[in-house]
Structure formats: structure tokens, C-alpha cells
Image: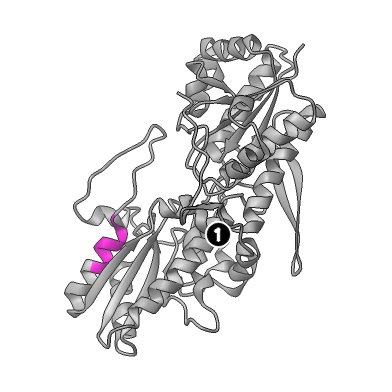
């Protein structure tokens, strides 16, 4: 039987997800794979047989290097949740028919929680039908909310971008001798890892943000306004970082306290936007000061020009480790990162049962949030800072980053 493998990307992209794809591709070829296929738009595209031969797209070492340094998902992504096996066995039969048609021996899926759910279900059905195909999860998410793994590839680069931009925003707020408040809105539905990264802006040449609000704790609007007022009495420029997913004690998203357009995806997730805008307007009306909103939005996950070398290297490693594990006979597992030391930073890869990872959300530990709920502790900073170290600059052409972009429709 041909040693063909297939790989897909799912969920929100990151600045380094393609480095994991490169790791899967290069390692599979080095270990003797005949074909490395790519799913166009994840499992959803796979069901429509949108499958490409990666060797026709990545022909040279330069192509591979460009792939590592290209942000977003080269193969395209999707947000498609497989039904429970007993609810639609016909769909699973179709998936395995396609896998057998392409003589696939190993299936790799690069993604977060929902993607690991896909690996869990497919590996379970393989057991049901006695299929020898192996299924491996490759971790990815800027949200850093996957269980068991110390951190996820993608988080480090997003944290580096957030810390860097936050530092620049703080500097900008000091320009004029007037009272002003800036509210920075950072991604994070239920976990505040990204928002907490704003704390890294504090260093010898920057006083850092004044307050940080994570979704792990209920948000009190009145208390927030009171604290901002107290800060304005002491200084001219106040900068606050808030997670887009902060909720009131009653469970209502803060952005829902004002007029908003509601969009819900296939997983039932509301699109979160407008939290900072609401709070900035509230403060301006209360204190008559200038206020502004900074929504980092998708920039957090696609800023390939400010990639962490640690992050992009680990992304490549987890992709390669998944292939090695599958070729050694493992299935139904996800590659995890294990931290051995903060200083010097040492991290290795390992494997873990995907059933104990899928659909489990890792939040910021409560002991890493200050008692008053308006910042993160030094332990959080010590955990995050090693992940943003060093840079891998883009390959620049005519003054701009060069990406590998191939029409694969």
C-alpha cells in the first residue's frame, strides 16, 4: 500500500500555522511518504474532495522557507464540526471512503479545540471499522487554551505582537498634555491569555498598561469607571487592555450593553466586537476627556512581520513530531509541548491522548491574576516572556514581506 498522508488546517489562523504545515510536509517526505496531500479548507473541503498534492505546490527549499514565514492558513481553513458518530455514520463512511481512495495511511489536522474534536471522532471511528489509518493532532491557536500542553504554537507570536503594539500605544498617549483614555480590545472569548500578554509591555522604558481585564473574572462596569477616574486624577494618559469576551456578573457580554450587530458561527460562538468602543465612550461621557479605541482584531493572528523565532521553531517541531509519531504507529493523540525550564528556556515535545484534550478549555490560573482583578502577576509574565523571544524576519521583496500564495482552487 502507498505511504500517502494528508494534512489540513482548521479554525482561526496564526502567524506560524504554516510552519507546522511545513514541518508535516518535510518530515513526511524525509520519512518516505509517496504523496503528501493537503485538504483545501479543512475537513469541509475534504468532503468535497478539494484535495491537492503538496509536492506540486512546494517544489524547492525556498518554497518551504517561504511557507514557514507566510501567515494565515496556506491550505485554507474551516469551522466545521463533525456530528457525533451515532448521529451520522454515513458521513464517517464517506470520509473513510475518500481516505481509502487516496490510499491515505496517516491524517494530520492542525488546529485548536474543535480540530482536536475532529481527530478524536475520526480515530474512534477507525477503531469501530478496524481501519489502520492513523490520526494525529497538531496544536495551534493564538488563544493558548488547549489543555495539557504547556502552550500552543501561535500564542507566542500573537503575544509578541500585542506586547509590542501596546507599548507603542502607551507611548502615543503621552504626546499631548491633556487627559486621555485608550482602551485596547484583545481577542479572547473565555480565556485571557492574549489580553494578559499586554503586561509584557512594561519594561525599563515603558510603565506598562494601567489595568488589564480578563474574561476569567466577572466585569463590573461601575468599578471600571471609578478606577479610571481615580487614575485620571493622578496622570494624563490612561491605557487599559480588555478581553473582547469580558462579561458582567449576570453573564452578559459587555459589548452587548450597547447597540451591536450579532453574528453567530456554526459552533454557536457569537462574534465579539465593540467592548472597547463601549467602554471608551462611557469614560469619555463620564469625565469629558478624550478617549480612543484600539481593536487589534485579526492583526493579532496574521502579523507575520513580528513573528517570534521561538514560536515559529516550535510550530515546525510539533508538525514534524506528529508525523514521526504516526509513522511509529501512534494514533488518536496530539503533540504537546512540555516546558522543562524558564531560564534558560527549554521545551520539548511529547504525545497525549486527544480524548483528554478535545473540548477542554485551559484558562489563565486564578493565582496568576492580581487580587483586585485588574492585572496579571509576575508568574504570568515569567511564563509568557520566553515565548516571544527572538525574531524570524520575513523575506523582503520591494520593501514588503514576500508570501507564498498559490491558486489551489
Residue 140: percent from the left, percent from the top?
58, 44
**Which part of the image, by quadrant, shows the C terminus?**
top left
Q: Is residue 32 above or below residue 188?
A: above
Residue 25: percent from the left, percent from the top?
67, 33
Neighbourhood count class around disc 1 (C-alpha, 10 Å): few under 14, some 14–19, many 20 upward = many
Decide which of 160, 147 is in the foreground and name it: 160
**Residue at x 47% of width, y 82% of height:** 207
Decide which of 119, 87 is in the foreground and name it: 119
Can residue 180 be seen here? The reply is yes
| Range of magenta residues | 274-280
Magenta region includes residue 121: no
Q: Is residue 45 above or below residue 193?
A: above
Residue linked to disc 1: 364
Q: Secondary structure at mark 1?
A: loop
Chief SS of the magenta region: helix
**Relative to 155, 184 lies left or right:** left
What's the colour scheme?
A: one colour
Amino acid at each position: 500500500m502507498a505511504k500517502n498522508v494528508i494534512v489540513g488546517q482548521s479554525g482561526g489562523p496564526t502567524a506560524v500555522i504554516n510552519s507546522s504545515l511545513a514541518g508535516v510536509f518535510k518530515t513526511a517526505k524525509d520519512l518516505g511518504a509517496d504523496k503528501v496531500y493537503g485538504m483545501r479548507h479543512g475537513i469541509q473541503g475534504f468532503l468535497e474532495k478539494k484535495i491537492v498534492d503538496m509536492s506540486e505546490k512546494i517544489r524547492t527549499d525556498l518554497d518551504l522557507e517561504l511557507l514557514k514565514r507566510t501567515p494565515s492558513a496556506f491550505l485554507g481553513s474551516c469551522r466545521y464540526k463533525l456530528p457525533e458518530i451515532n448521529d451520522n455514520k454515513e458521513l464517517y463512511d464517506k470520509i473513510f471512503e475518500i481516505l481509502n481512495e487516496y490510499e491515505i495511511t496517516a491524517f494530520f489536522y492542525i488546529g485548536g479545540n474543535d480540530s482536536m474534536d475532529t481527530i478524536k471522532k475520526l480515530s474512534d471511528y477507525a477503531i469501530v471499522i478496524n481501519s489502520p489509518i492513523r490520526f494525529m493532532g497538531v496544536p495551534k491557536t493564538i488563544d493558548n487554551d488547549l489543555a495539557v500542553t504547556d502552550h500552543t504554537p501561535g500564542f507566542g507570536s500573537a503575544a509578541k505582537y500585542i506586547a509590542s503594539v501596546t507599548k507603542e500605544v502607551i507611548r502615543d498617549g503621552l504626546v499631548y498634555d491633556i487627559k486621555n483614555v485608550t482602551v485596547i480590545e484583545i481577542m479572547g472569548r473565555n480565556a485571557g491569555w492574549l489580553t494578559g500578554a499586554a503586561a509584557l509591555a512594561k519594561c525599563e522604558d515603558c510603565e506598562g498598561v494601567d489595568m488589564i481585564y480578563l474574561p476569567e473574572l466577572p466585569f463590573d462596569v461601575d468599578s471600571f469607571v471609578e478606577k479610571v477616574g481615580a487614575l485620571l486624577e493622578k496622570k494624563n494618559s490612561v491605557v487599559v487592555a480588555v478581553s473582547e469576551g469580558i462579561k458582567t456578573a449576570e453573564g452578559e457580554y459587555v459589548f452587548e450593553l450597547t447597540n451591536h450587530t450579532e453574528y453567530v458561527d456554526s459552533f454557536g460562538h457569537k462574534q465579539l466586537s465593540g467592548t472597547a468602543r463601549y467602554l471608551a465612550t462611557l469614560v469619555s461621557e463620564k469625565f469629558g476627556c478624550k478617549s480612543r479605541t484600539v481593536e487589534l482584531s485579526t492583526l493579532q493572528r496574521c502579523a507575520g512581520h513580528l513573528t517570534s523565532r521561538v514560536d515559529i521553531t516550535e510550530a515546525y517541531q510539533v508538525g514534524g513530531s506528529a508525523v514521526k509519531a504516526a509513522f511509529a504507529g501512534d494514533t488518536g493523540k496530539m503533540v504537546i509541548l512540555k516546558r522543562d525550564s524558564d531560564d534558560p528556556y527549554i521545551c520539548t515535545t511529547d504525545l497525549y491522548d486527544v480524548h483528554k484534550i478535545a473540548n477542554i478549555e485551559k484558562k489563565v490560573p486564578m493565582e496568576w491574576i492580581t487580587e483586585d482583578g485588574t492585572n496579571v502577576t509576575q508568574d504570568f509574565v515569567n511564563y509568557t516572556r520566553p515565548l516571544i523571544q527572538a525574531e524570524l524576519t520575513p523575506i523582503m521583496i520591494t520593501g514588503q514581506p514576500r508570501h507564498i500564495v498559490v491558486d489551489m482552487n
